[in-house]
Image: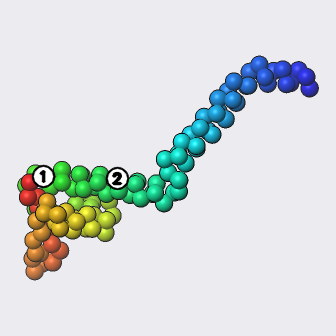
């Protein structure tokens, strides 16, 4: 048994101590910045929304007119999230929303920039 412990200490002691220190330090820093997970989720959600807005504006920057379903399909996002993002951008005056046609009643969107 003494031989086992001497081998363990010789080969794994530094790795084990480094691993323990890293895990406890990382979790402590995370808890220091985010005391609860609700704040962390809210910040991640806000970053995701800004990322989606940037993708939508980049896509609509070419001057073409797009439908919400086409935008969602091209970006690989779900339709409801994309539609909410588009409505927010219209409310802030960065996009224009037009009415649909008789064949397709979904509204059209185009960039004002």
Residue 98 in the image, given as x and y percentages of width and height:
9, 71
Q: Secondary structure at mark 2?
A: helix
Tell me the residue at 91%/22% (across/down). 2
Q: Say whether residue 9 is visible.
A: yes
Q: Residues within 10 Å of mark 2 (few under 14, many from 20)?
A: few
Tell me the residue at 63%/40% (across/down). 24
Q: Residues within 10 Å of mark 1 (few under 14, many from 20)?
A: some
Residue 61: mark: 1
Q: Give the CA separation, mark 1 to mark 2.
A: 21 Å
Report the side of 94 relative to 52 (left or right). Answer: left
Q: Quadrant of residue 104?
A: bottom left
> Between residues 101 and 7, which one lies in front from this camera angle?
7
Tell me the residue at 10%/51% (across/down). 62
Residue 47: mark: 2
Residue 8 in the image, given as x and y percentages of width and height:
79, 24
In the image, residue 43 above or below residue 107:
above
Report the side of 102 relative to 80 (left or right). Answer: left
Q: Secondary structure at mark 1?
A: loop
Q: Say whether residue 70 is visible.
A: no
Residue extending furthest toward the right:
1
> Between residues 16 and 24, which one lies in front from this camera angle?
24
Question: Where does the C terminus fall, quadrant-wise?
Answer: bottom left
Judge depth for marks 1 and 2 and give the one in front.
2
For the image, the number of numbered tags is 2
Q: Earlier in the sequence, mark 1 or mark 2?
A: 2
Q: Quadrant of residue 12?
A: top right
Report the side of 40 relative to 10 (left or right). Answer: left
Residue 79 in the image, given as x and y percentages of width and height:
30, 67
Residue 110 in the image, given as x and y percentages of width and height:
11, 61
Coloring scheme of the render?
Answer: rainbow
């Amino acid at each position: 048994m003494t031989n086992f412990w001497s081998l363990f200490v010789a080969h794994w002691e530094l790795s084990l101590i480094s691993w323990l220190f890293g895990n406890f330090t990382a979790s402590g820093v995370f808890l220091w910045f985010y005391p609860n997970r609700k704040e962390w989720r809210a910040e991640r959600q806000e970053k995701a929304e800004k990322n989606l807005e940037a993708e939508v504006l980049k896509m609509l920057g070419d001057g073409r007119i797009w439908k919400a379903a086409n935008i969602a399909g091209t970006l690989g996002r779900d339709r409801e999230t994309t539609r909410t993002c588009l409505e927010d951008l219209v409310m802030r005056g960065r996009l224009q929303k037009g009415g649909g046609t008789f064949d397709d009643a979904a509204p059209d969107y185009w960039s004002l920039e």
